[in-house]
Image (cartoon, grey):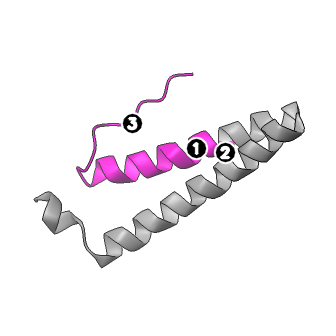
Amino acid sequence: MTLSEVIDDQFLTRYRSLLDAEDAAFDELEHAFEDGDRMHFDQDLCAWRTAVEKKLRYLHRLGVVSPPTISA
């Protein structure tokens, strides 16, 4: 299957949803950082990383990107 066959309305809708989730998680992370709230920062960092990994897994499953890797 070619990339042009993968990218359709369903792909774009799902990808937009994953991007929105990542963006929302990053906003929370940013607020915790700015507030100096370490406990929430750690939780929000985990949530943001999870959102990024979920997006990358989706793209990998469709063959758009290589397997996701995020180092701790």
Which quarter shows the N terminus? bottom left
Numbered label attached to residue 47: 2
Q: Residue at x 34, y 75 (%)?
A: 10
Numbered label attached to residue 15: none
Q: Nearer the viewer, residue 61 or 4?
A: 4
24 sits left or right of 39 in the view: left
SS at badge 1: helix
* Crowding near the residue tagged with mark 3, few <14, some 14–19, many ≥20 C-alpha atoms within 10 Å: some
Mark 1 — residue? 50
The CA distance from mark 1 to mark 3 is 11 Å
Label located before the other in sequence (2 or 3): 2
The CA distance from mark 1 to mark 2 is 5 Å
Residue 39 % position (x, y)? 86, 34
The amino acid at mark 1 is Thr
Where are the magenta residues, as a range? 47-72
55 sits left or right of 7 in the view: right
The amino acid at mark 2 is Ala
Residue 55, above or below 6: above
SS at badge 2: helix
* Crowding near the residue tagged with mark 2, few <14, some 14–19, many ≥20 C-alpha atoms within 10 Å: some
The amino acid at mark 3 is Pro
Mark 3 — residue? 68
Q: Residue furthest front?
A: 34
